[in-house]
Image (cartoon, helix red, strand yellow):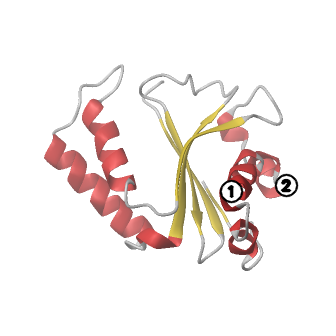
Amino acid sequence: MKYKILDKNSYTSMIKGNNYCENRKEFVENISVNKIVLEDRAYLDLDNKFPKINIKGQYTDIYSLPGNLARIMGHGGAYKRAVDSNFAWKVATEFVENEFENRFEDFDLYEVVIENSKWFFDVAWDYSFIIVDKINNEIIFMDLTDTD
């Protein structure tokens, strides 16, 4: 899901200053209560109207994203065996090139766990990323699972 929810420069202005890391953490942890996100997040099937978002990792770029995606495909899941590592790398790098135009430093990347989602069981093959496009002021939610 991709949302254009930020005013021009609101994210970049918000994260500057003395509390750079803390401001980002607060922003991500509270994104689920944004009005536009609230209206369009039924796909998460959340038990809680205001789910807690736990940040597992945060990065000021997306250089690691192709590797993370290739690793996820390479590990497989509960119902499928892993895909060939060369194929996984090719798919992951092509995805990043096509979706993000290889603008690695224009994004912030957050690995997160969204609590109380019925489809997301926080097991080895469930992954969620929140990606913030600092140039276009967009928020991208990327959820991967092999749970039925």
For mark 2, give the secondary structure. Answer: helix
Looking at the image, residue 110 lies above or below residue 93: above
Q: Nearer the viewer, mark 2 or mark 1?
A: 1
Looking at the image, residue 96 lies above or below residue 28: below
Residue 123 picture location, percent across and down: 48, 22
| Closer to the camera in the image, 8 or 18 | 18
The residue at the point 30 percent across, 29 percent down is 76
In the image, which disc is placed on residue 129? none
Residue 115 picture location, percent across and down: 68, 29
The residue tagged 1 is 24
The residue at the point 82 percent across, 47 percent down is 33
For the residue marked with disc 1, what is the amino acid? Arg
Looking at the image, residue 126 lies above or below residue 101: above
For mark 1, give the secondary structure. Answer: helix
In the displayed structure image, the side of residue 83 where residue 128 appears, left or right: right
Residues under numbered marks 2 and 1 in contact, where contact means CB atoms less than 8 Å apart:
no
**Cα distance between the residues tagged 2 and 1:** 19 Å
For the residue marked with disc 2, what is the amino acid? Lys
Image quadrant in which you'd find residue 138: bottom right
In the displayed structure image, the side of residue 104 where residue 134 appears, left or right: right
Q: Residues within 10 Å of mark 1 (few under 14, many from 20)?
A: some
Residue 45 picture location, percent across and down: 70, 31
| Closer to the camera in the image, 60 or 107 | 60
| Closer to the camera in the image, 145 or 122 | 122
- The N terminus: image quadrant: bottom right
Specify which label sits upstream in the sequence, 2 or 1.
1
In the displayed structure image, the side of residue 34 where residue 63 appears, left or right: left
Image quadrant in which you'd find residue 131: bottom right
In the image, which disc is placed on residue 35? 2
The residue at the point 71 percent across, 53 percent down is 22
